[in-house]
Image: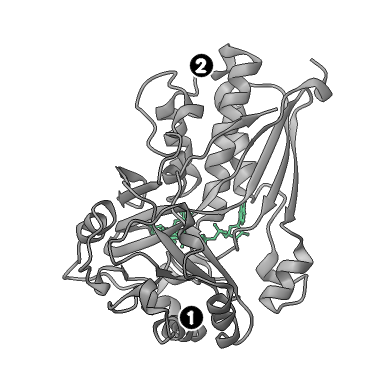
Amino acid sequence: MSNSRRPHYRTSPPAKLNLFLEILGRREDGFHELDTVMVAIDWRDELQLQTKSEPGITLDVDWLPSRAAVAVQLGVASDDALLHVPTDESNLVYRALNLITQTSGYTGGWTVRLSKRIPSGAGMGGASSDAAAALRLAAVALADLDSGLARELTNDKLRELAACLGSDVPFFLGDLPSNPGGDVAAVVAAGSPGSLARALGRGEKLIFYQLSTPHCFIVVYPAIALSTAAVYGRAKVTDHPRCGLDVINAFVHPHPNINAEILYNALTPPACGLSPPIGEAIQCLRELERPTHLLGRHLPHCQMTGSGSACFIWLTPDGSPADDGCRLTGVDEALLATIRERLPGGALVQTVATCPAAPKIHIE
Ligand SMILES: C[C@@](CO)(OP(=O)(O)O)[C@H](O)COP(=O)(O)OP(=O)(O)OC[C@H]1O[C@@H](n2ccc(N)nc2=O)[C@H](O)[C@@H]1O
Ligand SMILES: Nc1ncnc2c1ncn2[C@@H]1O[C@H](COP(=O)(O)OP(=O)(O)O)[C@@H](O)[C@H]1O
C-alpha cells in the first residue's frame, strides 16, 4: 500500500492529577514505593500517526494553539526550556514506537505528529500519556495492516512495555482487560465520567475505580518545570504512612462533608524546597476569595500534582453532582484572571473535568 493511502490513527492523550501521594519506601533500584491516587483530566495533547513502508520514525512536535501564544501566557521567551519537547529518541513517543516495532517484528516505519497542550515538567504526566497513546495507536494500526504483526501485542504485553517506558505510563492505558488479543481500542465506555486509579509499587500496579460523576478542578501551571528525579531525590520516606482510601471514597461516593486534608502529596515539601514559588502558588490558591456557592463552606481543597509544579483546586467538594457544565457554572473568566494576576511570573490556568485515561481512537 502506498504511504499516502494509509489511514491516520489519532487520539487526544489526557493529563493526570495526583489527588494523593504517599512515599512508602526507597527501593534498591533507586525508585520509591508509592501509594498514589490519580485521575485523568481533559487537558489534552493531540497525537496522530500513520504507518509508512520505510523503516524509521519521523516525529513532528508543535504547541497548541502555538508556541508563541503559550510563551506569552507563561511570560517566557519563546525558546525557553519550559516549552522544550524533544523530537529525538528521548521523546517517549519515539521510544514507545521503537518498542512496538521490536516486539511485533514490523519492518516499516512511522510518521507521527504530536501537538502539545500539556505543560512539560508539570507533574501532569503529559509525556507518559503521549507514550501510552502511541502504544495503543500503533497496536491498532499494526493489527489493521497485518493481523500477524499484532499477535505479540497482547494487553499484558502492552502493559509491560508501558512500565518499561515510565512508572506513570500504564495508568494511561486505562483499565485494559487481561486477555490475549483484547481490543486495545475499546477500553473507553462512551460518556464515562472518568478514570480514577490507585497506583502502588513504583506506580505501575493499578486498581481502577469507576467514577459515578465527573469531578472538576482549576489547574494552575506556574511557569516552572521540575525534574521528577530531582524532586524524588529530596523526598523523605515516612514512618507513619497515610492511606489513599479516603480520597478514593470521596471521589467515588461524593458527599457534603469531605475533609480538605484528604488531598495530600508527600512530594510537595521537596518540590517547594527546590522551587519556593510553588509553595507561594499553593498559598495563593488557598487564599483566593472563592464564590461561596462554588467552593461552599469547606476549607479550600488545593494540592500540587505529582512532582510538581502544577497545582489544583478541587471544585466539587460539596457533593453536588458536577454535570458537563461544571466548568462553566461559577468558574468565570474573572476568577481565572485573578489567579493569573496573583501569580508572579506567568501561569497557565484552566478549568478541567475528569475523563477516561485511555481516550477514543479515531481512524481516518
Ligand atoms: C511523581 C509522579 C507521580 O505520578 O509523576 P510526575 O510528577 O512525574 O508526573 C510519578 O511517580 C513519576 O512517574 P514517571 O514520570 O513515569 O517517572 P519515571 O520516568 O518512571 O522515573 C523518573 C525518575 O523519578 C524517580 N522515581 C519515579 C517513580 C518512583 N516511584 N520513584 C522514583 O524515585 C526516579 O529517580 C526515576 O529515575
Ligand atoms: N512526549 C513528550 N512530551 C513532553 N515531554 C517529553 C515527551 N517525551 C519526553 N519528554 C521529556 O519528559 C520530561 C517531562 O515529562 P512530562 O510528562 O511532560 O512532565 P512530568 O513528568 O512532570 O509529568 C521533559 O524532560 C521532556 O524533555
Q: Residue at x 54, y 81 (%)?
A: 339
Horizontally, is 138 left or right of 181 in the view? right
Mark 2 or mark 1: whose residue is earlier in sequence: 2
Query: Dot 2: within a 10 Å radius of its alpha carbon, few (fewer than 14), some, or many (20 or more) residues?
Result: some
Q: Which residue is mark 1?
A: 278
Q: Residue at x 46, y 52 (%)?
A: 324
Horizontally, is 10 left or right of 288 in the view? right
Does residue 115 appear in this view?
yes
Q: Which mark is nearer the camera, 2 or 1? A: 1
Identify the element where label 1 is drawn. Answer: helix
**Residue 119 found in image quarter:** bottom right
Is residue 206 positioned above or below 62 on the image? above
Query: Dot 1: within a 10 Å radius of its alpha carbon, few (fewer than 14), some, or many (20 or more) residues?
Result: many
Does residue 105 appear in this view?
no
Residue 206 place in picture, x, y as percent: 32, 44
Q: Amino acid at mark 2?
A: Arg
**Residue 25 found in image quarter:** bottom left
Quadrant assignment for ligand 2? bottom right
Closer to the camera, 303 or 27? 303
- Residue 151 is tagged as 2
Q: Residue at x 60, y 76 (%)?
A: 347
Q: Residue at x 80, y 21 (%)?
A: 5
Is residue 238 positioned above or below 214 on the image? below
Residue 36 place in picture, x, y as percent: 31, 57
Is residue 273 positioned above or below 170 on the image? below
CA gap, disc 2 and disc 1: 46 Å
Closer to the camera, 229 or 39? 39
Q: Amino acid at mark 1?
A: Ile
**Quadrant placement of the C terminus:** top right
Horizontally, is 95 left or right of 299 in the view? right
